[in-house]
C-alpha cells in the first residue's frame, strides 16, 4: 500500500468517524484487472477496500449530482475533478459548504488499454510507482515507463493540482505546459477543410451511441438529454451518419465553457473515439474571446450563461469578440 | 454551376422590424430555394436547428434578428449571437465552411437590405459549390423521402 | 469428420470459398479486431487471445436497420427485408456462436419468426475458432459454455501451431473441407490436450445450480443499490453483449423510414412510459434488470442461461464493474440475510 493511499484512508476515516461527512467518494480495489472502481464509503470499517493509484480512471465529480444538495460529501479530487466540482457549484448542483474535498496532486491517469497492449491479457498484479508501472503478468514482469502509458488528456494536463481542496495530500506538482492543449487544436485547425471533415467523420461514425461519454461526464447531468427527447425528435435515432454526427457535434457544443478537459469521455468510450479535440477547441475559443476557463473558481459564470451589452459593438461586424 | 440555386434555410425573428414591403416580400414572394422558418426571437434558435438544416441539405443558413438594443425580449439576440457565432466557428472547425452561415441584424431603416443580403449570400454560396460532407440526410421531400 | 488445415493454405482456401460465399472474418482495426469482409488484401487476426470488440450478433441483427420505407402522402409502403445470402463467418469464438443460438430462441422460435434474422441466419455457416488462451475477463466455463464449446457452430478449429485441427459439426459444411487431409488419432489427441488445457486455465467463478432461485429471492433487497452505485447507466455492457437483443422501433419521419435500433435496459428512457411513470426509475432497478434477465428470466423464457461468459461487459465497463463479482455478491447476499433472520 502506498503512503498516499494510507493518507487518504486515514483522512477518510477521520471524516467518517467524526461525522463530518455522510459519504466519502473515492476508489476501491478492482474486480477486473487494472480497473479500480468508484466507491462510496459510509462506514469506517469499509475503508480497507479503499485504493488509489494511476489506474483510477473515473472523474468522481460525476457522482456529485446524484446526491441531494444537503448531503455532506467527502470526495477525493485530483486537478480535473476539482475543476469539475467548481463548475458544478457554479451551476448550483451542490453547495460548497456540504463538500469536503480531499485533494491529490495528480501524476496522470494510466490508460489500461495501453498497458494491456504491452503486457497481454493475463495480469496477476501491478504496482504504480513514481515513474514506472510494474506489471506482473503470468509469464513475466513488465516495468513500463509511466509517462508513455498516460491517457492523452493527462499528457496535456495544465493544472494537475486541486485548486480549492480542503486538504492537500502529497506535494503540489509543477503546472503543466498550457501550449500543448492549444497546439493540438491549432494543428487540427491547420488541416484542410476536407481533412478535418474526414477526421471528424471517421471518429464520429464509429459511434455505437452507448452514451458512455455522456454518462462519464460530470457536466452532463441533464434529466433529459436532447437525444432522448422524442416529441419532437431532434436527431436521427440510429447509428447512421446523420445520427452520430449530430450527437458528437451537439454533445461537444453543450460543453462550451463548461468542459474542464478531464478526458473522462474518451476514457469511457468503448470504441476509442477521439472527442477532446472538439471540446478543447471550444475551450480554447472561450479563453481567447472571454478569458474564461471552466472550473477555475466556483463563482464565475460561463460565457454562454452571461452576455453583456458590450457584445453589441462586435454585433453587426459579425466579428469575433476580442 | 451558376444556374444552381443553393438551398437556404432562413431563420427570421418574428419581431424583426422589416420595412412592410420587405416583410411582405419575405412572407409571400420568397424564391423556392429559400425556406423561411419564423422564430419568436433569435434566442430561440438552438444550434440543433442550424445543424438540422445543414444535415437536411441546406447549403447555407441565414439568421436574421433585431439590432442589439432592440430585442423584444431585451437580450435574446445577445445570447443567440454568442452561441451561434461560436457554433458557426465550431462547425467550421469540423469542415463546414462558416461562410455558409450568415447573420443579418437589421432595422426598419434597412429598407431592401434583406433582398440584397439574400442575393449576395446566394452568390457567395454558388462560389463555394456544394456542401455534401455533412449533409448526412436525404433532403426533405413532401411526405418523407421515398427512394 | 476431422481434418487438418495447414495455416499456409488458409488464405487460398478462403479465397476459393469466397467465389461462392461472402466471408466475414476478424481483422485488426486499431487495437481491436472486427468482423469484416474477407478480400484478397485482408489480413486476418486469429492469434489474439481476445475476442472482437463488437459482438458477432451484429452480423445477424445490425445495430440500426431500416425495416420499412414509406411515403406519408401517397401511403406507399415498401418492406426492406434483406435477401438471404450465402455467408461464412470464419473465426467466430464459441461464446459468440452459442450466443447466436440463444438469440434463435428470440427471433426464430414458435410464433416469433423475424424475417430479417431468418434471412441472415439461414445460409450463414459459422466456422469457429476455439480459444487456447482465454483472457482474464473470460468466464465461459462458468456459463454452460467453454473455450472449445461447439454449440451453434458448423465447424470448430483448434490451433495446433502450424495447422488448424478442424472438426466439422454439421453436414452442410462437409463439402468445404472434403479436400483436406483427414486428421490422424495422434493429432486429435494433441487437439484434445490443447482444449483441456484451455478449459483448465479458466476455473469456474460460480456455480449455476440454484442461482436463479437465489437471485429471485433477493429481488427486492438492498444489494442492488450497492451493486449499481458506481454504474454510469451507459449502454456499453448491453450493446457489446452477444446475447442482449432489446430493440426499439423508430419512425424517422424526415426520411420516411422505420428503423429498428438496439435499445438497452440501462437507459432511463427504455422503460419510461407515456404517462411519465417509470417502473425502473433508478440505476438500481436497471442494473437488477440486466443481471436478472441474464441469470434468471432467461431460464423462464428459454430454459437456458442468457450469458455466454464472453466478458465484454467486464472488459469495457468504464467503471470497472464485473458481472462475475456482481452475481457472486448478489447470490451471497441471500445467505447473509438468512443468517440475519
Image: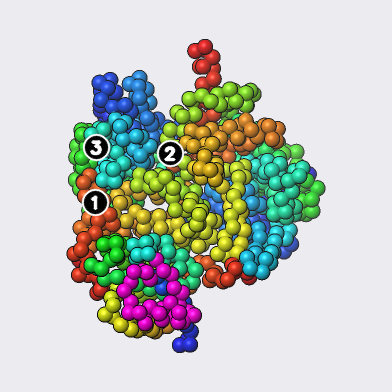
Measured as percent of width and height from the top left, residue A258 is found at: 30, 51
Q: Write down the residue under mark 2.
A: C319
Return the x and y of residue B65 as percentages of the image width and height. 32, 70
Q: Nearer the viewer, residue C275 or C53?
A: C275
Instruction: Judge the density around disc 2: few (<14), some (14-19), many (≥20) Cα neighbours within 10 Å.
Output: many
**In the rendered structure, does residue B38 fall within the stretch colored magenta?**
yes
Describe the element under mark 2 as helix, strand or loop: loop
Mark 3–mark 2 Cα distance, whole angstroms, equals: 26 Å
Q: Is residue A285 visible?
A: no
Q: Which residue is drawn at 26% across and 71% down?
A: B67
In which quarter of the view is residue A238 placed?
bottom right
* Residue C293 visible in rendering: yes
Name the residue that disc number 1 marks. Answer: A301
Q: Are marks 3 and 2 on the same chain?
A: no
The magenta stretch spans which residues? B12-39
Q: Residue A96 carries which label?
A: 3
Write down the quadrant of residue C123 in the picture.
bottom right
The location of residue A300, given as percent across then percent down, is 21, 50
Label 3 close to label 2 by CB (< 8 Å): no
- CA separation in Å, label 1 and label 2: 30 Å
N-terminal of the two: label 1 or label 3?
A: 3
For the residues tagged 1 and 2, is the chain the same? no
Amino acid at each position: 500500500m502506498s503512503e498516499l493511499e494510507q493518507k487518504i484512508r486515514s483522512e477518510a476515516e477521520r471524516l467518517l468517524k467524526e461525522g463530518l461527512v455522510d459519504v466519502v467518494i473515492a476508489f476501491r480495489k478492482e474486480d477486473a484487472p487494472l480497473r479500480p472502481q468508484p466507491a462510496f464509503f459510509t462506514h469506517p470499517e469499509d475503508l480497507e477496500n479503499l485504493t488509489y493509484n494511476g489506474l483510477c480512471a473515473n472523474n468522481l465529480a460525476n457522482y456529485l449530482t446524484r446526491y441531494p444538495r444537503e448531503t455532506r460529501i467527502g470526495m477525493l479530487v485530483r486537478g480535473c475533478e476539482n475543476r469539475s466540482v467548481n463548475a458544478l457549484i457554479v451551476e448550483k448542483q451542490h453547495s460548497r459548504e456540504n463538500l469536503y474535498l480531499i485533494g491529490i496532486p495528480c501524476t496522470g491517469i494510466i490508460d489500461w488499454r495501453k498497458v494491456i497492449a504491452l503486457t497481454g491479457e493475463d495480469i496477476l498484479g501491478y504496482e504504480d510507482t513514481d515513474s514506472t508501472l510494474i506489471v506482473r503478468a503470468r509469464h513475466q514482469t513488465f516495468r513500463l515507463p509511466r509517462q508513455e502509458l498516460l491517457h492523452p488528456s493527462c499528457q496535456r494536463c495544465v493544472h494537475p493540482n486541486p485548486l480549492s481542496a480542503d486538504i492537500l495530500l502529497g506535494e503540489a506538482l509543477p503546472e503543466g505546459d498550457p501550449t500543448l492543449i492549444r497546439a493540438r487544436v491549432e494543428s487540427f485547425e491547420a488541416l484542410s477543410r476536407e481533412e478535418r471533415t474526414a477526421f471528424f467523420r471517421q471518429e464520429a461514425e464509429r459511434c455505437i451511441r452507448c452514451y458512455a461519454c455522456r454518462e462519464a461526464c460530470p457536466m452532463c447531468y441533464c434529466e433529459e438529454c436532447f437525444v432522448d427527447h422524442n416529441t419532437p425528435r431532434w436527431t436521427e435515432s440510429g447509428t447512421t451518419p446523420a445520427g452520430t454526427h449530430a450527437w458528437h457535434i451537439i454533445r461537444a457544443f453543450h460543453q462550451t465553457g463548461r468542459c474542464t478537459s478531464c478526458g473522462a469521455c474518451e476514457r469511457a468510450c468503448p470504441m476509442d473515439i477521439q472527442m477532446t479535440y472538439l471540446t478543447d477547441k471550444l475551450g480554447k475559443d472561450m479563453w481567447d474571446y472571454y478569458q474564461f476557463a471552466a472550473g477555475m473558481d466556483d463563482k464565475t459564470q460561463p460565457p454562454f450563461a452571461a452576455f453583456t451589452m458590450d457584445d453589441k459593438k462586435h454585433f453587426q461586424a459579425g466579428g469575433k469578440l476580442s | 454551376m451558376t444556374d444552381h440555386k443553393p438551398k437556404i434555410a432562413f431563420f427570421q425573428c418574428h419581431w424583426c422590424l422589416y420595412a412592410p414591403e420587405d416583410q411582405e416580400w419575405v412572407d409571400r414572394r420568397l424564391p423556392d430555394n429559400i425556406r423561411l422558418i419564423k422564430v419568436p426571437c433569435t434566442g430561440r434558435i438552438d444550434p440543433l436547428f442550424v445543424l438540422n438544416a445543414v444535415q437536411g441539405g441546406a447549403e447555407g443558413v441565414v439568421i436574421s434578428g433585431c439590432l442589439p438594443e432592440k430585442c423584444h425580449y431585451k437580450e435574446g439576440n445577445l445570447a443567440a449571437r454568442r452561441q451561434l457565432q461560436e457554433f458557426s466557428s465550431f462547425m467550421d472547425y469540423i469542415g463546414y465552411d462558416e461562410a455558409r452561415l450568415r447573420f443579418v441584424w437589421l432595422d426598419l431603416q434597412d429598407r431592401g437590405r434583406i433582398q440584397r443580403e439574400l442575393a449576395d449570400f446566394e452568390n457567395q454560396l454558388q462560389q463555394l459549390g456544394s456542401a455534401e460532407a455533412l449533409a448526412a440526410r436525404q433532403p426533405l421531400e413532401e411526405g418523407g423521402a421515398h427512394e | 469428420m476431422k481434418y487438418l488445415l495447414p495455416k499456409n493454405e488458409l488464405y487460398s482456401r478462403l479465397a476459393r470459398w469466397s467465389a461462392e460465399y461472402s466471408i466475414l472474418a476478424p481483422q485488426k482495426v486499431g487495437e481491436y479486431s472486427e468482423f469484416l469482409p474477407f478480400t484478397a488484401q485482408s489480413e486476418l487476426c486469429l492469434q489474439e487471445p481476445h475476442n472482437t470488440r463488437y459482438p458477432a450478433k451484429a452480423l445477424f441483427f445490425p445495430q440500426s436497420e431500416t425495416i420499412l420505407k414509406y411515403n406519408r402522402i401517397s401511403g406507399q409502403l415498401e418492406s426492406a427485408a434483406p435477401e438471404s445470402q450465402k455467408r461464412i463467418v470464419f473465426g467466430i469464438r464459441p461464446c459468440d456462436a452459442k450466443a447466436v443460438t440463444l438469440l434463435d430462441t428470440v427471433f426464430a422460435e414458435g410464433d416469433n419468426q423475424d424475417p430479417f434474422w431468418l434471412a441472415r441466419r439461414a445460409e450463414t455457416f459459422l466456422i469457429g475458432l476455439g480459444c487456447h488462451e482465454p483472457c482474464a475477463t473470460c468466464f465461459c466455463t462458468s456459463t454452460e459454455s467453454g473455450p472449445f464449446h461447439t454449440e451453434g457452430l458448423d465447424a470448430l478449429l483448434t490451433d495446433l501451431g502450424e495447422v488448424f485441427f478442424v472438426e466439422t459439426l454439421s453436414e452442410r459444411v462437409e463439402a468445404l473441407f472434403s479436400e483436406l487431409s483427414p486428421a490422424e488419432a495422434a493429432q486429435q489427441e494433441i487437439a484434445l490436450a490443447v482444449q483441456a488445457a484451455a478449459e483448465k486455465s479458466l476455473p469456474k467463478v460460480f456455480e449455476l445450480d440454484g442461482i436463479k432461485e437465489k437471485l429471485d429471492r433477493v429481488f427486492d433487497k438492498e444489494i442492488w443499490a450497492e451493486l449499481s452505485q458506481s454504474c454510469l447507466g451507459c449502454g456499453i455492457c448491453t450493446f457489446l453483449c452477444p446475447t442482449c437483443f432489446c430493440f426499439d422501433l423508430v419512425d424517422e419521419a424526415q426520411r420516411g423510414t422505420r428503423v429498428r435500433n438496439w435499445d438497452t435496459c440501462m437507459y432511463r428512457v427504455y422503460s419510461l412510459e407515456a404517462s411519465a411513470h417509470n417502473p425502473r426509475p433508478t440505476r438500481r432497478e436497471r442494473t437488477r434488470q440486466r443481471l436478472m434477465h441474464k441469470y434468471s428470466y432467461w431460464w423462464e423464457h428459454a430454459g437456458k442461461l442468457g450469458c455466454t461468459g464472453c466478458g465484454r461487459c467486464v472488459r469495457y465497463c468504464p467503471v470497472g464493474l464485473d458481472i462475475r463479482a456482481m452475481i457472486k455478491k448478489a447470490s451471497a447476499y441471500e445467505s447473509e440475510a438468512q443468517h440475519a433472520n
